């Protein structure tokens, strides 16, 4: 049987449509879908790569900010914190509480002297002056950190002295210079507020509130000890607390008289240090 031209044409069309459908659905559409997914994955990766670059930039920027703040803090530490040894007017909190009971009154004396000097900056005459906290001679050695250094109530040892109202006398410039000088107080951070100036020039009276803060640098803090046991010092018992310098007196006198020194501590092992009197 001979097929006509129309039948041959239809058969050809059907073969072409079948082949096209086979290629379209079995290869072209899946391949295009895969290409679309690959392109999307590439776009996502490019976006993440861009984020990584931005993240690195943010990290570098944050590091610069941290380094800048650290540099500022290092400058504060170098000039506005007490030294880390008693010989230079500071304190070492790594010593055991027995030694700390001897060193802390000496450190307190250094603070008082620093405050005494600062009070007269600008050439003013001090009318009322503060006294730095005096340790109770009968205070248990394990309470010194909490009572004087505010540790562990705060996360780090710090001195906080709210001295209240200070009264000075001088010219307008002397009083302003006196107040402004606290920002440069060596080894401590001092803050004044509520300045009031009264009187008739040149003999003016200035009053202001004073707070002094001391951040204590230390690598470690010695743990508490059994107060019923010996300190085990090779040098025998510790000496007394010694005299305490007073605040600056009325008028031009800088500082009150030295208090009487305490008696020397016991001479051998098994003795507890005996703090002496603390004069103001």
Image (spheres, rainbow, N blue to C red):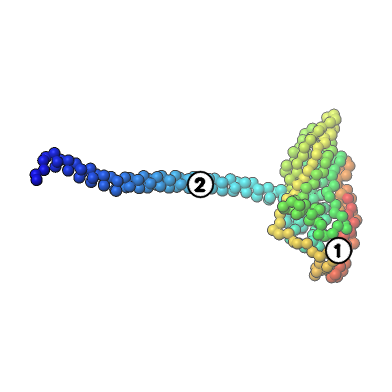
Which mark is nearer the camera, 1 or 2? 2
Which residue is rendered at x = 75% and y = 62% of the image?
Answer: 223
Q: Which residue is mark 1?
A: 273
* 10 Å crowding of disc 2: few (<14), some (14-19), many (20+): few
Q: Nearer the viewer, residue 160 or 45?
A: 45
Check contact, mark 1 vs mark 2: CB within 8 A. no
Q: Residue furthest top?
A: 200
Q: Looking at the rendering, which quadrant does residue 6 occupy?
A: top left
Quadrant of the frame with the N terminus: top left
The answer to whether any part of residue 122 appears in the image is no
Quadrant in the rendering for residue 268: bottom right
Between discs 1 and 2, the one toward the N terminus: 2
Q: Residue at x 75, y 49 (%)?
A: 214
Q: Secondary structure at mark 2?
A: helix
Give the residue at x 81% y 67%: 231
Would you say 124 lies left or right of 70 here? right
Expressed as whole percent of the image width and height from the top left, the position of residue 215 reads 73, 50
Badge 1 element: loop
Judging depth in this view, the residue of 2 and 87 nearest the camera is 2
Residue 93 rendering spot, x and y as whole percentages: 75, 58
The residue drawn where x is 68% and y is 47% is 76
Residue identified by numbered label 2: 55
Q: Quadrant of residue 225?
A: bottom right
Q: With respect to residue 95, does 36 lie above or below?
A: above
Which disc is residue 33 wearing? none
Whether residue 222 is visible, yes or no, is: yes
Q: Is residue 199 left or right of residue 90?
A: right
Distance between mark 1 and mark 2 Cα atoms: 59 Å
Residue 62, horizontal then vertical, whole percent: 56, 46
Could you say which is closer to the camera, residue 15 or residue 77?
15
* Left or right: 4 in relation to 21: left
Relative vertical location of residue 192 with respect to residue 223 in this rendering, above or below = above
């Amino acid at each position: 049987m001979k097929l006509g031209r129309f039948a041959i044409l239809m058969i050809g069309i059907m073969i072409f449509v079948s082949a096209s459908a086979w290629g379209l659905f079995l290869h072209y559409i899946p391949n295009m879908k895969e290409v679309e997914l690959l392109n999307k994955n590439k776009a996502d990766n490019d976006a993440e790569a861009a984020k990584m670059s931005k993240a690195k930039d943010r990290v570098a920027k944050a590091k610069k900010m941290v380094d800048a703040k650290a540099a500022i803090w290092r400058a504060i530490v170098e000039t506005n914190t007490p030294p880390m040894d008693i010989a230079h007017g500071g304190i070492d909190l790594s010593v055991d509480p027995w030694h700390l009971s001897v060193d802390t009154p000496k450190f307190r004396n250094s603070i008082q002297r620093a405050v005494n000097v600062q009070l007269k900056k600008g050439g003013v005459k001090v009318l009322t002056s503060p006294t730095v906290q005096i340790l109770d001679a009968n205070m248990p050695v394990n309470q010194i950190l909490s009572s004087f250094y505010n540790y562990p109530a705060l996360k780090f040892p710090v001195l906080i002295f709210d001295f209240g109202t200070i009264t000075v006398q001088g010219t307008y410039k002397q009083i302003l210079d006196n107040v402004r000088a606290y920002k440069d107080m060596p080894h401590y951070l001092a803050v004044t507020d509520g300045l009031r100036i009264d009187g008739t020039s040149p003999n003016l009276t200035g009053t202001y509130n004073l707070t002094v803060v001391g951040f204590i640098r230390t690598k470690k803090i010695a743990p508490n000890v059994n107060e019923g046991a010996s300190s085990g010092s090779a040098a025998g018992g510790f000496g007394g607390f010694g005299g305490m310098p007073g605040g600056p007196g009325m008028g031009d006198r800088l500082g009150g008289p030295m208090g009487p020194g305490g008696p020397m501590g016991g001479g051998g092992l098994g003795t507890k240090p005996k703090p002496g009197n603390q004069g103001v």
